[in-house]
Image: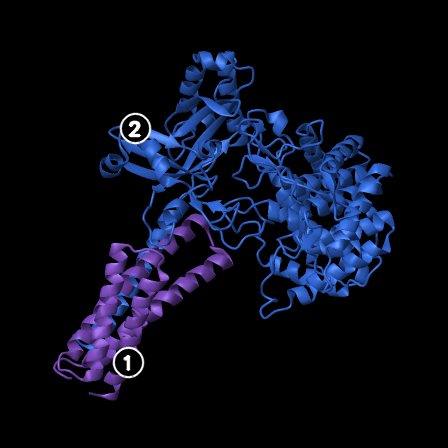
Amino acid sequence: MTRAHRILGAVDLLVGAMLAAADLLALPMRWLPIDALLLSLAALFLVAGGALLAGVAWARRVALAAGGVALLAGLALTTALVLSAAHLFGLYGPVGQGGAVLLGVVAALIVPYLVLLPAAQLWVLLPARKGAR
Amino acid sequence: MTRRVLARFLLAWAAVTLVLAGAVNVSARGTRSPLPSRAVQTWALDALDAAVARREAPRAPDAARQFRAAGPIVAYAWARGVPLGRFVGDASLAGTVARAAAHFRADPLLRAEPHVETTLALTRSRTPFVRALAVPFADGLGLVPLRDGLLAEFDGKRAVITPDEMLADGTYDRGLPTPIPDLTLGANVPALVDRLARDVGSEPRELAARGHVERIVVATIARTVYPRARRVDAESLLDAATIGARFLLRHQSPDGRFTYVYDGRTGAPADAGYSTPRHSGATYFLALLGNETGDADARRGARRGLAFLMERTRTCGDTARLCVVEDDGSVDFGGSALAAVAASAYLEGGDDAAVRAFLAGVAAFLRGQQRVDGELMHGFDRATGRPVDIQLMYYSGEGALALALAGRALHDARDTTAAERVLAHLTGAGWDFFGSRYYYGEEHWTCSAAAAIRESADTRVALDFCRRWAEWNRRLQYGPNETPWAIGGAYGAGNVVLPRLTPVASRSEAFVSTYELAVKNGVRDDALRPEIEAGLAALLRYQWDPGPTWLFADPEGARGGIPGSPADLTVRDDYLQHAGCAMVRWAHLLRSGRRTWASP
């Protein structure tokens, strides 16, 4: 197990815990589609984090799956937000300071955890060239 | 999979998202077709009016015969605010007007109406109506208020909902509730689609599956122009304030009570309770106008308004202390404070022993509510005869203004000193915390109070506070073409919320006070006057003079009102209060001809 794997493992545990807390504590009501998505993602990160820290053989594959699923979800959400913003800009014109701040806050909540972090995780875990480890 | 594949994938995603966003943006903007000339518009309305009156129609000019809209044209014949006659035509103006005229001519309902007003709704662009976007509530925001309507086509049938119909139905700004009272936004899209589906003889799901719904940008063609740009000078401001006062007086009962909420659609009061502070504010405006212009009717209306308040006065603690109470007997601190403001303004126009005694009693009550640190306690328990130390929004500023004006009217130094202490607290220790330079509350009463004591007290700290508040608001003030609406001068933090006019009015009034403070202290602030006049221009533009008369049940009854927002057809008594006070006070400055650093 490399130092990078240990760091990734710790980060995955943290993100998994944050996602679970966000769903169970921050959301005011239970709604199956969102609960299922967030808790599955949280479980995937927790398992991947634990496995990476424990140095088990299948750790890399689970961590890759966690990063991949999170990245796809993050990209889909970001795309939807960008298209919505583009539509509203088209309808209403420049959205103003308030709108910019609001969109910035939404982006700050999503991009680091569901785009940058999973992308970094995949970057670390994937080989630079085919066949390399 | 390798890192290189991952990088390529992310780059491809970014590029596709960017291109899609551009396409979505362009599609949402649409391209608007030009409007017909004013002469052609007048011909169209003349032709429809002639049909309603069963007169011979004027001949269509060549330009009218050639004009084609981007989509359907709808002709209306409105009576008592209701579209009694409605004809949905095609894109041809002359063809639609001819067929609508025949339709109106044959309508027995229209024949029976004493006053009918015709309008046309002209489609300027058609774009796909996009729903289910990812931004929260984007569905309700998918229609730009006052500009966008909907068009549905199903099985060869067509249904249209125009902005005027949505305005008449009160559909705009009702779709999405917010945690802030008085603030809702967006359209109720499911209800609108439901109506379209019914109109084409379908169900919403069936319409979505087999038909299609488009967003249409619509222009209304009417005899009266609304909103109507007007210059900002003393004459126009006093004219506007006077017709505003006439509105209030028209809707004041003999016991002095105002219509709390007037609904332009019904021409009658809306059942919405009553507010003594707002009643007092409206009374203050009438007194102020009477003082400025010598308007005897306004002064009589103010006296009736004061009589209503004096009727609701009780002793609070000491027998010399008077307070205004609610219907349930509870003490209304804000109502008492603004009653004192109105009484003070009334006394400035001439003495009245009963009003003077009332004012002295209320001022004594307000002084008794003051804490050691200058803050006012807003509760009072009549059972124990003791103040209750709670603070409510607006009330400290209102109390400060009441004491400042009472001190001036009664020549009582105790009131002036008490006002100075409240202000020292509100503009000093009361607004001194981490982040206090980046956020402000509703401070219009505070700055008005500071201006009221400017001749007798050191107001440099208050001026600094009010200038910071004005600067903060300036960043939220819209320029002429920043929003889809002609609402430059109003305040807001984002285009998707149609700006409200009441905050424009209260801020404009407060910045007039700030201007007075700056002049008194010899501080030059060149940004204040444009900010004030842009706000006043917005208020003048949206005052019902005469307003969208076709939407009113009683256009004469509605004249002079200022609605809560451009998409609102109701007037609450306080909507006129701040607007009227701002107009009168700025007109006073313009007329005074004083030479100052930026002499108006």
Q: Nearer the viewer, mark 1 or mark 2?
A: 1
Q: Could you say which quadrant of the image residue B142 lies in? A: top left
In the image, residue B382 above or below residue B270? below
**Residue B534: x percent and y percent?**
64, 49
- The chain that hosts pointer 2 is B
Residue sitting at the far front: B384
User: Is B587 positioned to the left or the right of B162 in the image?
Assistant: right
Residue sitting nearer the eye, A32 or B365: B365
**Residue B470: x percent and y percent?**
65, 58
**Residue B547: x percent and y percent?**
59, 32
Residue B506 visible in the picture: yes
The purple chain is: A
Residue sitting nearer the eye, B410 or B348: B410
Query: What colour do you see for chain B?
Result: blue
Q: Residues within 10 Å of mark 1 (few under 14, many from 20)?
A: some
**Residue B141: x percent and y percent?**
41, 46
- Indicate the amino acid at tag 1: Ala
- The chain that hosts pointer 1 is A
Q: Residue at x 46, y 51 (%)?
A: A93
Residue occupied by mark 2: B200
Residue B36 visible in the picture: no
Residue occupied by mark 1: A10
Q: Secondary structure at mark 1?
A: helix
Q: Residue at x 30, y 60 (%)?
A: A77
Residue sitting nearer the eye, B174 or A92: B174
Q: Secondary structure at mark 2?
A: loop
- Indicate the amino acid at tag 2: Val
